[in-house]
Amino acid sequence: MEISLFCDELWLSNPDETSHEPKQRILERCPGCSFYNTKEDCEQASIICSKKELSYIPEPGYLEYLQSNNLMNFRLKAIQWLFKSRSRLNLCYGTVFNAANHLDRFISMNQCHGWKCWMIELLSVACLSVASKFTETSAPLLQEIQLEDLEHWFESSTIRRMELTLLQTLGWHLGCVTPYSYVELLLSNVDSLEYHLHNQLTTRFTQLLLGAMLDFKLLEFRPSLIAVSALRCCLDELIPSSCSHLASTSLLNQFQKDDLHKCHMIMKSRMVDPLSNILVSGQLHNWPSSPVTVLVKERIDIYDSQVDLSMFKLPGSNINSESCRKRKRQLLEH
């Protein structure tokens, strides 16, 4: 049976993202290349994405749940680990965005009490593994994924069980729409650019979207809104004359002005925040790996027999389905 039957994919998926070569490098190599032949194709794909994204957002109250359960630092460490793993394993940017989406959706759907560090790490490994299998031509081995920067080591059987729990909880819906899904769609609305300028714009755009994943304030905004705000910030910085052209796209017309303004202001503040720039400055380059001569903290082995995954809810346990539908109706009204 084809995987598309499980993953709810649409025609608009970019074949470039299945390459083991990061999409950023593909765009740098051939910035004029596009999966979409006309602007009408892009607009149609944008409409489909903006509707589809409502099925791939965390449950209502996710931000409040993270704050009230002291999970903000856990999530921050998990996202940073995904960034470093992407660079170390030479994965596509789409893979890390999808993995982060899986992680946020899973936590929001399993609001159990007593999250511990090893639980977040196990979930992070499973999310990156599943996202890699879905996106990459050659997915890394489970042992490779957890080589660095984790406090615990998990058996392959444990990770596979966690992968299955993750897939069941997400309903096998893996074809995420994330802010990164809009990179090519939105760049198509910018007038033709010279090679170096297109390369610079794409790099800065991707950098801002990576940084947005670290900012908890942006968890409340739709992926498309985050993407539009990030591109507007890039254009303000690099090509101010293109902003008015972007404002006329069909994608922007779907947003409330207040929400767009709020998101844009948060994104602008990230651009001038020194701490924010430090956190993401290395994301588009290789993270330094620990030299083999450096002593690392000894890890704690977690054996399969020690891990009880029944603490996590499964889809049959009534996971806020009504509240999710209500939220989607409210978003569609906007």
Image (cartoon, grey):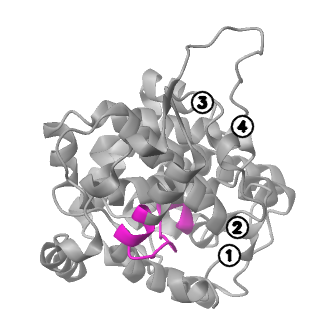
Q: Give neighbour class at mark 4: few <14, some 14-19, many 20+ (Cα, 10 Å).
A: some
Q: Which residue is mark 3?
A: 281
Does residue 7 appear to the left or right of 60 in the view shown? right
Distance from the alpha carbon under mark 2 to that under mark 3? 23 Å
* Res 106 → quadrant: bottom left
Mark nearest the camera among 1 and 3 is 1
Distance from the alpha carbon under mark 4 to that under mark 3? 16 Å
Q: Give neighbour class at mark 3: few <14, some 14-19, many 20+ (Cα, 10 Å).
A: some
Kind of residue at badge 4:
Arg
Q: Which residue is mark 1?
A: 14
Percent coordinates x, y for residue 256 in the rendering: 24, 69
Q: What's drawn in magenta, residue-wise?
A: 165-182
Number of marks present in the image shown: 4
Q: Is residue 152 above or below residue 331?
A: above
Does residue 131 appear to the left or right of 54 in the view shown? right
Task: Of the two numbered discs 4 and 3 on the same chain, state the one appearing first in sequence.
Answer: 4
* Image quarter of the C terminus: bottom left
Q: Which residue is mark 4?
A: 88
Mark nearest the camera among 4 and 2 is 4
Q: Which residue is mark 2?
A: 17
Percent coordinates x, y for residue 221 in the rendering: 30, 58
Q: Secondary structure at mark 3?
A: loop
Q: Is residue 40 above or below residue 101?
A: below
